[in-house]
């Protein structure tokens, strides 16, 4: 993998975006028996955690299309940076508006959820950084 090639850098950035989507949607698979609390967790804030996961999926698709013959690498890199910035801003808005009663309302066996919000924000920041690096290679 040659990271000086925009397509290869795009594949790496797409992998980061896919990992962020997995992290964002992991509680849906791992948490059982806390339906109302889980629903409130995902609906918190102006956009919710679902928006972060969906934007990460969109970013993965955008960055995978960078090396395709029917797309312009520079344009898709720019679109990817905008989507990544939107993802980090949405994640920050969700984290800042997440009600503590929802966060600490999960059963004790799911105490790891208290750190999940920071993992989502860190993943969004890493996605934004890798998208900037990928766009730089496309220039």
Image: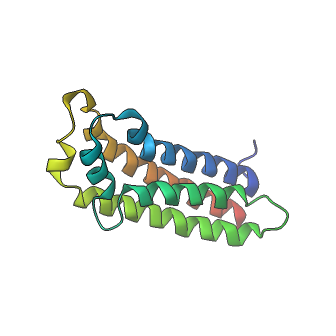
Q: Residue furthest top?
A: 109
Q: Nearer the viewer, residue 112 or 124?
A: 112
Say which residue appears at 64% left-offset and 63% top-offset.
135
Residue 132, position as x, y percentages in the image: 57, 61
Q: Is residue 28 above or below residue 60?
A: above
Q: Nearer the viewer, residue 70 or 6?
A: 70
Numbered disc total: 0
Residue 86, position as x, y percentages in the image: 46, 67
Say which residue appears at 32% left-offset and 47% top-offset.
117
Quadrant in which the N terminus appears: top right
Quadrant in which the C terminus appears: bottom right
Say which residue appears at 40% left-offset and 42% top-offset.
28
Say which residue appears at 51% left-offset and 62% top-offset.
84
Q: Residue 26 vs residue 65: left or right?
A: left
Q: Residue 67 vs residue 57: left or right?
A: right
Residue 30 seen: yes
Residue 11, position as x, y percentages in the image: 69, 49
Residue 5 seen: no
Specify the quadrant of the image occupied by residue 137.
bottom right
Specify the quadrant of the image occupied by residue 29.
top left
Residue 30, position as x, y percentages in the image: 39, 33
Specify the quadrant of the image occupied by residue 91.
bottom left
Q: Is residue 46 above or below residue 16?
A: below
Q: Nearer the viewer, residue 54 or 137?
A: 54
Q: Residue furthest left?
A: 101
């Amino acid at each position: 993998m040659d990271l000086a090639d925009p397509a290869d850098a795009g594949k790496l950035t797409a992998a980061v975006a896919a990992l962020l989507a997995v992290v964002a949607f992991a509680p849906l698979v791992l948490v059982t028996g806390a339906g109302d609390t889980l629903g409130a967790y995902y609906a918190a804030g102006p956009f919710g955690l679902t928006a972060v996961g969906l934007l990460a999926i969109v970013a993965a698709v955008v960055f995978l299309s960078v090396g395709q013959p029917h797309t312009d690498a520079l344009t898709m890199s720019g679109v990817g940076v905008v989507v990544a910035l939107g993802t980090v801003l949405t994640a920050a808005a969700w984290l800042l508006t997440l009600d503590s009663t929802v966060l600490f309302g999960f059963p004790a066996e799911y105490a790891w959820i208290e750190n999940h919000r920071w993992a989502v924000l860190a993943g969004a920041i890493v996605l934004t950084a890798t998208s900037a690096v990928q766009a730089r290679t496309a220039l």
